[in-house]
Image (cartoon, helix red, strand yellow):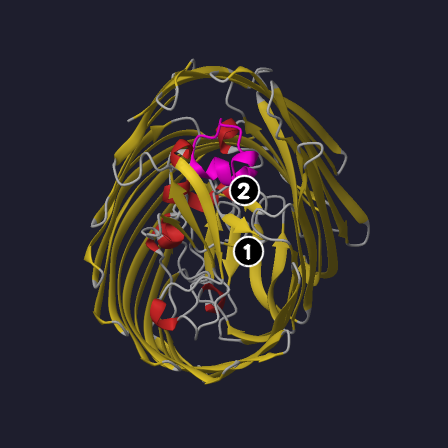
């Protein structure tokens, strides 16, 4: 692993970015060979589960000795040899001199814009108790933990959440990391803090107790200008909007887990979670020199209890019983003065003041059982059954002093109950080099739906999902082929039969009833090589076709949009991608290649006109990274994106990115780094090119103890960055404010 490191990595996430086979998304999601990993362990102990970003974004890279990739990972020893798992886990090994001792690091930094970072990580490892303490405060745009949901491992197996409750707290997703066109460090004006205590207590091999506790706050500012137009037959343009938004999130959770093993063949597990969060935001929008105001507030709390029993009956059988109880509450308040929806509401002024409050509550419980059987030396059978019950309450109220038209009913009191009886069978058999599998998953759903508070006819549904596939290996090549016939129901927002406000310019409306959807999914995966092999190649081919989908009947005007859910026939998606990591020992270079093609085909209704929309997105890139032992090293890379939208004419969006990292290491204690980027885009006749440059100096004052870092960011002092996007027929050009030129000095001390 040391062959790929340069020594300037700050946290574990930085190390994984340079290792072959790994990809780390902007939000910290880690993939190996194209597949998302499920957990990151430290010295064989898992504390954070899917919330592994807590480790990868905070644990000091200098304490890391090795990374082990565990493919086909099975967590429970009682199920090994019976369960076929596709999960991938990572195990981090720490340097011998710090293992099983109290260790950590402290870093402090301040730049010329009076923005700061302060971080402390303390870790104590011994045979009985492992403890992790993370303290972090920064205003440099860094994400401290990722999504809180992942850390809580919060999901709902009773009813697909979908649009039922949006647990992304940032109002209207303005601050979603995946939506920012550049690194958050370049454009996120934030002030964030995190405090977390976590421990694993294991007095003996039969008992284990875990606790995760976290409190965080995030304050963000966002400034941008937005220009929108719709590419209908007669192009519809909207006035330029200048948005200034401030937002604050306060969140916390506590999660406890305990494991009791009464004997070598069985275990009891309990997991309890309490999570609370609130968000508030204020925005000012300037349109035609007029100041308009929005206020948002959101509150969430959730409690979940899980109880598992696992028993290895004998060498060929195991039984798993799972019980769950969950309760969620979510409320959202939105005030706008004014809304650009006056024409829709028959207001004479074209605008009106509006306030909308939405409250969501869900209580669910479930009981499931899984029976795993070895029917022969090379054949296995999994049988599962379960029952679940959910009660979902959704209340929505809209008020406006100017609204007198009774045609618009903006008050809903909805109650949905669902009884779900499920079953499934999956068989696996080995035939020569082929591992074959086939199975079927079924659900019998009995919904009851009331609106204001009249009962609505709701038919019962019987969903069947068959699947079949195989995987096999030849030398260093691994193949996987699968097909799934999918079945699903409408989401809760899609069954609303009335209007609701999405933002100051958008009104939405659901279908008013449940609907049943079917689809086809075919997948092929090919992987050559493996972890730390000289060469590694991964390819994915995907075909998806939905026989019946929900689309929108869109009415677009220069001031507002009305989106009404409607049913449509076929929608198709084709995807092909390839990635390769190639080590060139003679050149001492690591070459990474990537390429993907995505194509979709669907219909949409705009202003009473049907449009057949075909999109094609091609993305490809490469990077060279040297691993010389001497004075100089480099990373050179480029990426391109071409988007083709075919309606009645062809519109092409092209985006290119070039970057270089140059490293100079005149001595073992002194290192210089220069980073340059060129971002260029061309779409709808709008061209933009931005050059970005940064410089760094790392000075090791005391080896493995004290390090000083100096950073100069945005040396060219660019003020703005323009990003263009194309979604259906809507073209948006957005100008973001960038963080001005700054100089940062920081010190890192290892305890």
Label number found at residue 425? none
Residue 410 figure quarter: bottom left
Residue at point 48%, 43% (across, down): 27
Lower position in the chain sequence, tag 1 or tag 2: 1
Marks 1 and 2, how far apart at CA: 22 Å
In the foreground, 122 or 99: 99
Query: Can you identify the residue that label 2 sits on?
Result: 179
Q: Is residue 43 left or right of residue 160?
A: left
Residue at point 63%, 69% (across, down): 472
Task: Give percent across and percent down for residue 357.
Answer: 35, 53
Q: Which secondary structure, mark 2?
A: helix
Q: How crowded is the residue under tag 1: few (<14 C-alpha within 10 Å), some, or many (20+)?
A: some
Q: Is residue 320 left or right of residue 539?
A: left
Task: Give percent across and percent down for residue 342.
Answer: 51, 48
- Is 3 included in the stretch rendered in magenta? yes
Residue at point 38%, 46% (across, down): 169
In the foreground, 699 or 114: 699
Query: Can you identify the residue that label 1 sits on?
Result: 35
Magenta part of the protein: which range? Answer: 1-18
Task: Give percent across and percent down for residue 124.
Answer: 25, 39
Residue 423 figure quarter: bottom left
Question: In this view of the protein, can residue 403 be seen by the observer?
Answer: yes
In the foreground, 7 or 109: 7
Q: Quadrant of the C terminus?
A: top left
Question: In this view of the protein, can residue 120 be seen by the observer?
Answer: no
């Amino acid at each position: 692993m040391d062959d790929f490191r340069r020594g300037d990595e700050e946290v574990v996430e930085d190390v994984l970015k340079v290792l072959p086979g790994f990809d780390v998304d902007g939000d910290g999601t880690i993939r190996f060979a194209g597949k998302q990993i499920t957990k990151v362990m430290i010295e064989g102990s898992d504390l954070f589960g899917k919330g592994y970003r807590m480790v990868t974004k905070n644990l000091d890279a200098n304490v890391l000795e090795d990374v082990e990739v565990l493919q086909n990972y099975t967590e429970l020893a009682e199920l090994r040899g019976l369960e076929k798992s596709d999960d991938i886990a990572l195990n981090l090994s720490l340097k011998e001199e710090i293992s099983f001792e109290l260790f950590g690091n402290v870093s402090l930094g301040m730049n010329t814009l009076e923005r700061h970072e302060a971080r402390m990580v303390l870790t104590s490892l011994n045979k009985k108790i492992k403890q992790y303490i993370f303290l972090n405060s920064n205003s440099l745009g860094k994400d401290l933990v990722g999504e809180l949901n992942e850390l809580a491992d919060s999901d709902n197996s009773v009813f697909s959440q979908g649009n039922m409750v949006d647990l992304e707290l940032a109002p209207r997703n303005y601050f979603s990391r995946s939506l920012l066109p550049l690194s958050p460090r370049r454009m996120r004006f934030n002030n964030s803090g995190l405090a977390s205590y976590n421990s694993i207590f294991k007095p003996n091999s039969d008992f284990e107790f875990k606790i995760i506790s976290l409190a965080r706050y995030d304050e963000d500012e966002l400034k941008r200008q937005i220009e929108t137009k719709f590419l209908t037959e007669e192009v519809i343009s909207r006035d330029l909007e200048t948005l200034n938004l401030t937002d604050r999130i306060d969140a916390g959770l506590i999660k406890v887990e305990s494991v009791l093993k009464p004997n070598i063949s069985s275990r009891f597990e309990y997991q309890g979670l309490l999570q609370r969060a609130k968000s508030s935001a204020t925005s000012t929008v300037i349109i035609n020199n007029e100041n308009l105001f929005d206020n948002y507030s959101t509150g969430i709390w959730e409690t979940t209890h899980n109880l598992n029993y696992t028993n290895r009956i004998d060498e060929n059988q195991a039984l798993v019983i799972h019980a769950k109880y969950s309760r969620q509450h979510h409320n959202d308040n939105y005030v706008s003065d004014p809304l650009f929806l006056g024409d829709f509401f028959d207001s004479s002024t074209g605008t009106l003041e509006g306030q909308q409050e939405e409250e969501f509550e869900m209580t669910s419980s479930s009981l499931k059982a899984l029976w795993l059987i070895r029917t022969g030396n090379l054949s296995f059978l999994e049988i599962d059954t379960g029952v679940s019950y959910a009660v979902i309450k959704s209340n929505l109220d809209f008020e406006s002093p100017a609204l007198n038209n009774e045609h618009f009913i903006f008050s809903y009191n909805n109650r949905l109950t669902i009884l779900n009886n499920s079953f499934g069978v999956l068989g696996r058999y080995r035939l020569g080099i082929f591992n074959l599998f086939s199975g079927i998953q079924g659900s019998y759903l009995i919904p009851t739906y009331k609106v204001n508070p009249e009962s609505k006819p709701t038919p019962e549904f019987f969903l069947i999902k068959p699947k079949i596939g195989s995987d096999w290996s030849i030398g260093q090549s691994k193949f996987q082929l699968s097909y799934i016939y999918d079945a699903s129901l409408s989401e809760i927002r899609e069954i609303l039969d009335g209007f609701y406000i999405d933002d100051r310019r958008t009104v939405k409306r659901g279908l008013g009833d449940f609907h049943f959807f079917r689809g086809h999914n075919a997948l092929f995966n090919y992987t050559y090589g493996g972890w730390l092999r000289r060469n590694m190649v991964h390819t994915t081919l995907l075909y998806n076709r939905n026989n019946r989908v929900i689309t929108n009947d869109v009415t677009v005007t220069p001031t507002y949009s009305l989106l009404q859910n409607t049913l449509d026939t076929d929608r198709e998606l084709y995807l092909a991608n390839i990635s390769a990591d190639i080590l060139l020992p003679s050149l001492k270079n690591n070459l990474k290649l990537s390429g993907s093609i995505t194509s979709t085909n669907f219909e949409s209704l705009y202003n009473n006109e049907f449009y057949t929309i075909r999109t094609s997105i091609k993305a490809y890139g490469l990077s060279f990274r040297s691993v010389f032992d001497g004075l100089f090293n480099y990373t050179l890379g480029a990426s391109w994106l071409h988007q083709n939208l075919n309606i009645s004419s062809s519109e092409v969006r092209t985006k290119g990115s070039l970057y270089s990292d140059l490293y100079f290491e005149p001595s073992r204690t002194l290192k210089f780094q220069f980073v340059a980027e060129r971002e260029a885009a061309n779409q709808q006749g709008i061209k933009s090119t931005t050059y970005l440059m940064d410089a760094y100096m790392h000075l090791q004052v005391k080896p493995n103890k004290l390090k000083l870092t100096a950073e100069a960011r945005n040396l060219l002092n660019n003020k703005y960055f323009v990003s263009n996007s194309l979604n259906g027929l809507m073209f948006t050009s957005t100008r973001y404010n960038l963080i001005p030129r700054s100089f940062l000095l920081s010190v890192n001390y290892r305890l």
